[in-house]
């Protein structure tokens, strides 16, 4: 992906300076039909950080990602992304901001009527690149997820895991500054889930893209925290000596509230009874 990383994009304006956090969620609350979904949620994601979001079903994890990409507005509180307040942004500016965000949806969300290649290139169209360059970038993104031979196939011809990989290729093709993964392993068997988490790790370690990763599988979370991509072998491996990846942090939500915000080390040593039970 080195070439993708260097190729830049017409949409990458207002690059924040490297010290500025990429996402700042401050005291955010949202209620649907009188039911509080998120309550006073605050946390920060630094540049280059991979933030794993864990928690029981219905805890507000997906709503949180929708707030971050401006698809929903909070009732109270503020959300800054790349230094811009997304909760007060006009639709036109939100559109621009979203062009810097790669999104991997819970169910892949590919267009069934167009080929894999067209699904992957879809977000490049607004950049009006020459066809040759578009093709080269599609190949490169598909190669990253080891699916370049599927370029002419249709999503219905692929397995669930392959469709998920295509959706990762689509998310990374614009060389985003932030990737939001909404349950990328949801509904997949354990072996296929591991291949998806390996790609998230590879993306993290090759391009250091800031990302938020929702997962229901605690084993996925630990795999992310304890593995690294080895550029020499081209494979994901366990970090030696029980090491952990410093850029990977955790946020645990339960019933709309933050019950944990910290490092892997802090998580595994937490004495909070609810957290111990949840992680066991
Ligand atoms: N647009 C909406 N209108 C009304 N209720 C909503 C809306 N979006 C989400 N909800 C409700 O908000 C709650 C939290 O949903 P959310 O999808 O964020 O949970 P989650 O933690 O991602 O759960 P899961 O792990 O099952 O994906 C749920 O009760 C859901 O029904």
Image: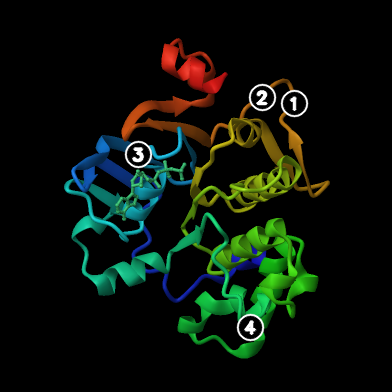
The numbered mark, 3 or 1, whose residue comes first in the sequence reads 3
Residue drawn at x 28%, y 57% is: 72
The numbered mark, 2 or 3, whose residue comes first in the sequence reads 3
* Secondary element type, mark 4: helix
Residue 139 horizontal/vertical position (percent): 71, 74
Whether residue 159 sits left or right of residue 269 in the image: it is right
Whether residue 21 sits left or right of residue 165 in the image: it is left
Q: Nearer the viewer, residue 161 or 78?
A: 161
The answer for how far apart the CA atoms under marks 3 and 4 are is 36 Å
Q: Is residue 236 depicted above or below 173 in this figure?
A: above
Residue drawn at x 70%, y 67% is: 142
The residue at which mark 3 appears reads as: 44
The residue at which mark 4 appears reads as: 133
* Secondary element type, mark 3: strand
Q: Are marks 2 and 1 in contact (CB under 8 Å)?
A: yes
- Pick the quarter of the image with the N terminus: bottom right
- Pick the quarter of the image with the C terminus: top right
Residue drawn at x 65%, y 67% is: 3
Circle 2 residues within 10 Å: few <14, some 14–19, many ≥20: few
Q: Residue furthest left?
A: 76
The residue at which mark 1 appears reads as: 240
The numbered mark, 3 or 4, whose residue comes first in the sequence reads 3
Q: Are marks 2 and 4 in contact (CB under 8 Å)?
A: no
Locate residue 120: give its quadrant: bottom right
The answer for how far apart the CA atoms under marks 2 and 4 are is 40 Å
The numbered mark, 2 or 4, whose residue comes first in the sequence reads 4
The answer for how far apart the CA atoms under marks 3 and 1 are is 29 Å
The answer for how far apart the CA atoms under marks 2 and 3 are is 24 Å
């Amino acid at each position: 992906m080195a070439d993708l990383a260097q190729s830049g994009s017409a949409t990458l304006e207002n690059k924040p300076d490297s010290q500025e956090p990429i996402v700042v969620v401050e005291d955010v609350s949202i209620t649907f039909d009188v039911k509080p979904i998120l309550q006073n949620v605050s946390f920060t994601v630094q540049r280059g950080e991979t933030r794993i979001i864990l928690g029981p079903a219905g805890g507000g994890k997906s709503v949180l990602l929708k707030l971050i990409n401006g698809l929903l507005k909070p009732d109270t509180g503020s959300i800054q992304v790349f230094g811009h307040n997304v909760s007060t942004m006009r639709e036109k500016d939100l559109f621009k901001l979203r062009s810097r965000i790669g999104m991997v949806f819970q169910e892949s969300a590919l267009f069934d009527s167009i080929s894999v290649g067209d699904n992957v290139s879809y977000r490049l169209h607004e950049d009006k690149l020459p066809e040759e360059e578009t093709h080269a970038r599609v190949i490169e993104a598909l190669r990253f997820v080891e699916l370049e031979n599927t370029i002419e196939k249709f999503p219905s011809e692929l397995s669930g895991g392959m469709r998920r990989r295509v959706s990762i290729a689509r998310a990374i093709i614009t060389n985003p500054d932030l990737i939001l993964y909404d349950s990328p392993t949801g509904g997949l068997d354990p072996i296929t889930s591991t291949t998806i988490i390996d790609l998230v790790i590879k993306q993290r370690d090759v391009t250091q893209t800031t990302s938020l990763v929702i997962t229901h599988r605690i084993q996925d979370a630990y795999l992310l925290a304890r593995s690294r991509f080895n550029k020499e072998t081209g494979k994901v491996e366990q970090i030696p000596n029980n090491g952990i990846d410093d850029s990977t942090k955790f946020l645990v939500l339960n019933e709309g509230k933050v019950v944990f915000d910290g490092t892997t080390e802090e998580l595994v040593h937490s004495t909070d009874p609810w957290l111990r039970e949840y992680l066991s």
